[in-house]
Image (cartoon, grey):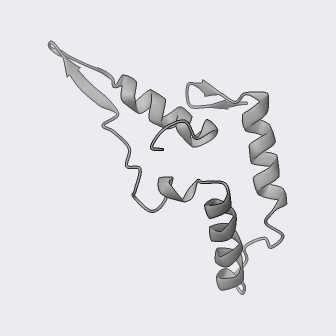
Amino acid sequence: MAFGSISLSSQSMFQWNAFSSLVSVKLDSSNYLLWRSQIESVMFSQDLIKFVDGSCPAPKQFIEEGANNVVNPEFIVWKGAELDQGYCR
């Protein structure tokens, strides 16, 4: 499975499946507070909350290199870190 230009490894797919299996409530118009509680608990337990609460902000997606804008290598690492948690430790 691809996420932007980053493909999901089997470990990342396992982490995603584990994450989704820990949330038993599907969000609908009547259960936001219960759903949010479960999502936050799982995000804390999987050390993912930092990508949502602003404690691990994204670097600029593009940087200037001469007269051109190019993809920032730090952004690519950060984007992949959402999947393997290897950034902002």
Residue at image position (81%, 40%) is 14
Residue at image position (69%, 63%) is 42
Residue at image position (71%, 73%) is 38
* Residue found farthest to the bottom: 30
Quadrant housing residue 36: bottom right
* Residue found farthest to the left: 67
Residue at image position (38%, 23%) is 73
* Picture coordinates of residue 62, whole percent (x, y): 30, 29
* Picture coordinates of residue 31, whole percent (x, y): 72, 84
Q: Would you say 57 lies left or right of 66 here?
A: right
Q: Would you say 3 lies left or right of 66 here?
A: right
Quadrant housing residue 59: top left
Q: Is residue 77 above or below residue 70?
A: below
| Nearer-the-camera pick, 15 or 66 | 15
Quadrant housing residue 27: bottom right
Q: Would you say 62 lies left or right of 53 here?
A: left
* Picture coordinates of residue 41, whole percent (x, y): 67, 69
* Residue found farthest to the top: 66
Q: Is residue 47 above or below residue 83?
A: below
Q: Is residue 88 above or below residue 50?
A: above
Q: Is residue 48 above or below residue 69?
A: below
